[in-house]
Amino acid sequence: MEKVQQPSGKKPRVESPSVGVKEVLEEGQPSGGAGAMVAMEAAAPIAEEHVVCVDKDELHCPRCSVPLKPPIFQFQCDAGHVACNTCHGLLPKNKCYSCHQDGSYGRSAVLEGIVGSARICPNHAYGCRSYVTYHAAADHQRACPHAPCRCSEPGCGFLGSPPELRDHLRDAHAWPVDKVRYGEMHHLRLPESQPRRLLVAEDDDGRVFLVSASAHAGGARHGVAVACVRAAAACLFRVVIIP
């Protein structure tokens, strides 16, 4: 049978979790008095970020020139030659591929920490604020909405983000601009004197689209193409109108 403990006049003692604290006397109490002590949780250390310049070659595999990413293997030789995971799988495991010293490979926690902390934004100058690890920068650049676009007008060397290109085409080349909303019908006219115009989505993404019309087969047919204005963009669809 379980023993039931009778309630007593003493309050139960509650064990608090172990945290860093310091004792502070309440204002007005002498240092040797019996003033109430206030427990203050120690502030957590704040991580600091610094801009450090590193030779780009140090972030690439010396054998295949691919950006290094974990796991990174370092040979136990005098120079500490390194190899990426792919190259490590193809190399002899008991001899350094560069200096030919005998030994073995091991994971390099230091290098893995460096490449994991190296963050860049290739399109920072064009408004992107998504800093990614260095070895993922190429994939990010292909999908980044801030990747710069070149002006399509002959002889114009302008290069800028899609919003900057929109303003450039409107102001420098007098391209008409229409605001549209997704899911709504819009009537557009593309006269022969101005066969191209820009569409700007009023929704949150603010994407810019290019609409262009062109004549085919001596004017008997007309094609209308729509493309999203971004780096390496392809035509979304093309419509051929036969009168």
Image: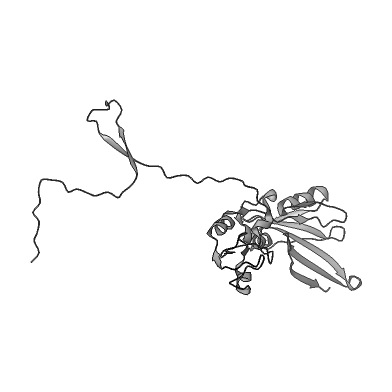
Instruction: Name the residue: 81% across, 72% down.
Output: 241
Instruction: Name the residue: 65% across, 53% down.
Output: 121
Instruction: Name the residue: 60% across, 68% down.
Output: 102
| Residue 239 position in % (x across, y down) | 77, 71
Task: Please give left or right for residue 238 compared with residue 35 in the image.
Answer: right
The answer to which quarter of the image holds residue 110 is: bottom right
**Residue 59 visible in this rendered orientation of the protein:** yes
| Residue 212 position in % (x across, y down) | 80, 63
Q: Is residue 136 above or below residue 222?
A: above
| Residue 64 position in % (x across, y down) | 69, 67
Colour scheme used in the picture? Answer: one colour
Q: Please, which residue is most extreme toward the right here? A: 218
Q: Is residue 183 above or below residue 159?
A: below
Q: Please, which residue is most extreme toward the front here? A: 102
The answer to which quarter of the image holds residue 70 is: bottom right
The answer to which quarter of the image holds residue 233 is: bottom right
Q: Is residue 156 above or below residue 98?
A: above
How many numbered marks appear? Answer: 0
Task: Please give left or right for residue 49 compared with residue 153 in the image.
Answer: left
Instruction: Name the residue: 8% across, 61% down.
Output: 3
**Residue 130 visible in this rendered orientation of the protein:** no
Task: Please give left or right for residue 167 compared with residue 72 in the image.
Answer: right
